[in-house]
Amino acid sequence: MTKLMIRPTRLPVFNDFENIFEDFFSRPGQTSECSYDFVPRVNVRETTDKIRLTFELPGMDKKDIKVWVENDMLNVTGNREFKSESNDGDYIRQEMRSGEFSRSFTLPETVNREKISADYKNGLLEVSLDKLEEVKPKEIEVKIS
């Protein structure tokens, strides 16, 4: 089994707690590290040939999603915006989150960096990571003599 390192992301609950300290200790006009509005869920599957990451991104346009590899890190970022139908505050509860997100994964050495692909369909982003040929299991024929 290949080890895929997932970079920790801060949960919104902790962001609120950290913001108290940032607001108290920061000077006017000083900016702090960007915190993200939501964290999409990701399923990670591994077969003998590939590792597949499936991101749950309903309500997004393909143009608002960016996938890239830099310094052995697979990065997925995006921005999801929901248009409010009215501005008169008639929501009783609003749980659908919008805004920016970022997820990063450290790529294992077994992944072929030249054969990474991404496909977005029906609110799911699937990133496919092909494994290098030399790390794929090879079946050896057993001869009977």
Image (cartoon, grey):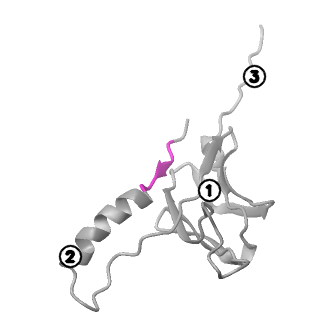
115 drawn magenta: no
Residue 112 in the image: above or below residue 79: above
Residue visible at 81% across and 60% down?
122
Which range of residues does the magenta coloring cover?
A: 3-8
Dot 1: element: strand
Spatial CA span between label 1 and label 2: 46 Å
In the depicted view, which residue is nearer to us: 109 or 10?
10
Q: Are marks 1 and 2 in contact (CB under 8 Å)?
A: no
Question: Residue 24's mark?
Answer: 2
Say which quadrant the C terminus sits in: top right
Farthest residue to the right: give it: 122
Percent position of residue 133, x then y: 66, 47
Picture quadrant where residue 101 is located: bottom right
Dot 3: element: loop
Spatial CA span between label 1 and label 3: 27 Å
Q: Are marks 3 and 2 in contact (CB under 8 Å)?
A: no
Q: Amino acid at mark 2?
A: Phe
Residue 145 in the image: above or below residue 83: above
Look at mark 1 in the image and give the residue it sits on. Answer: 112
Of the numbered discs 3 and 2, the one sitting upstream in the chain is 2
Look at mark 3 in the image and give the residue it sits on. Answer: 141
In the depicted view, which residue is nearer to us: 125 or 25?
25
